[in-house]
């Protein structure tokens, strides 16, 4: 046995070495493209993502605005990554003027109304539907018992390495970073966890609720994330940073065991790196049928429920402290 806190703080080199090994394994397992640069003639500034769902059809009904700046003068055409998305309309955000566009298997090309320069911001609004093969996953609910983990229906994203393009038009490569807003519409009984701060919840006439999240620190598209399902929130705090541990109802004690050391861990990494935690919140959410152990989406980590449930496995005496003390 070992004391985890002492182990974490025992040496910067040890921690950095372990982090490197874990990161390398994660990158390899999730097939991150080896090329670190990708040429572009524009820089995306902001995405506004509005989504709702046709659940029986596993369909996303999307409305995305992409705001970008050209890199050179004479900019007339925007090409974005897009796979399996069917577009109903493409318009200028400023005046709703329709724009000509064409799609192929992996992109959408939009012809602008005129030439633009680098000192201008262009907003393009896309309305569309998608039945994504990747990027967004619809997981049916499951009753617990007989070794099964009970949970509600879920909808969640997994963007790494390049799956965002399956549900919204984007420059889907980590070299381009932008801020985001998300408007995720779900059933009234459901929780929605997204990137950044929950700015508002809007009740709709049809009984659904739209959750508006804002992320003001630019980041790569593969980290755009949301989770929809019925959850119990176990709240915590590190300094002025709210922490959220989202687990299935009835698993609150497991949340404390699994995530209760989060404030200590953030503190340890602040000391080792000399950098304060840079974001406005940090949520950790369990989901079913997740293909990896976890994914470090910005401000909102997604974790496989099977991995978290291990801490209550009789093999470990039902107490995570047996592993870390």
Image (cartoon, grey):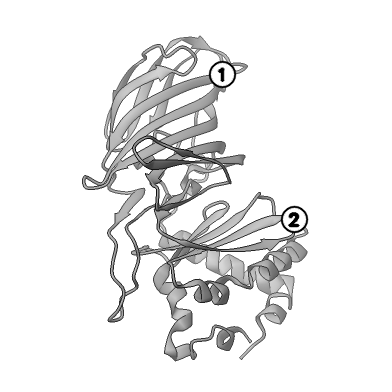
Q: Nearer the viewer, residue 228 or 320?
A: 228
Placement of the C terminus among the 4 image quadrants: bottom right
- The reply to whether residue 160 is visible in this rendering is no
Q: Is 88 on the left-hand or right-hand side of 8?
A: left
Say which quarter of the image contains residue 276. Answer: bottom right
Q: Position of residue 249 (x, y in %)?
A: 43, 67
Q: Is 240 on the left-hand or right-hand side of 158?
A: right
The tag on residue 276 is 2
Marks 2 and 1: which is nearer the front? 2
Q: Earlier in the sequence, mark 2 or mark 1?
A: 1
- Residue occupied by mark 1: 72
Circle 1 SS class? loop
Residue at 57 percent across and 37 percent down: it is: 179
Q: Is 53 on the left-hand or right-hand side of 178?
A: left
Residue at 49 percent across and 15 percent down: it is: 94
Q: Is residue 16 above or below residue 138?
A: below
Q: Alpha-carbon neighbours of circle 2 within 10 Å: few (<14), some, or many (≥20)?
A: few
Say which quarter of the image contains residue 18. Answer: bottom right
């Amino acid at each position: 046995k070992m004391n985890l806190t002492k182990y974490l703080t025992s040496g910067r080199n040890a921690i950095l070495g372990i982090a490197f090994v874990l990161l390398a394994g994660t990158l390899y397992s999730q097939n991150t493209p080896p090329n670190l640069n990708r040429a572009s003639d524009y820089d995306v500034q902001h995405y506004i993502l509005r989504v709702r769902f046709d659940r029986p059809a596993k369909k996303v009904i999307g409305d995305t605005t992409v705001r970008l700046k050209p890199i050179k003068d004479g900019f007339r055409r925007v090409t974005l990554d897009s796979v399996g998305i069917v577009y109903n309309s493409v318009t200028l955000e400023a005046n709703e003027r329709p724009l000509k566009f064409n799609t192929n298997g992996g992109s959408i090309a939009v012809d602008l109304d005129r030439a633009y320069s680098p000192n201008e911001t262009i907003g393009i609004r896309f309305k569309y539907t998608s039945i994504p093969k990747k990027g967004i996953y619809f997981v049916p609910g499951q009753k617990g018992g007989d070794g099964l983990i009970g949970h509600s229906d879920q909808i969640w994203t997994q963007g790494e390495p390049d799956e965002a393009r399956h549900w919204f038009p984007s420059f889907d490569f980590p070299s381009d970073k932008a801020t985001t807003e998300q408007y995720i519409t779900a059933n009234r009984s459901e929780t929605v966890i997204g990137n950044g701060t929950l700015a508002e919840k809007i009740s709709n006439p049809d009984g659904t609720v739209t959750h508006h999240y804002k992320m003001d620190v630019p980041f790569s598209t593969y980290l755009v994330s949301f989770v929809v399902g019925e959850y119990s929130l176990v709240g915590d705090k590190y300094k002025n940073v709210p922490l959220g541990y989202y687990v299935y109802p009835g698993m609150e004690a497991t949340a404390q065991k699994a995530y209760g050391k989060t404030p200590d861990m953030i503190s340890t990494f602040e000391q080792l790196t000399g950098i304060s935690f840079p974001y406005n919140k940090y949520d950790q959410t369990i989901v079913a049928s997740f293909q990896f152990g976890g994914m470090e989406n910005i401000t909102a980590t997604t974790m496989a429920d099977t991995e978290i449930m291990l801490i209550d496995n009789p093999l470990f005496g039902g107490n995570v402290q047996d592993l870390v003390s």
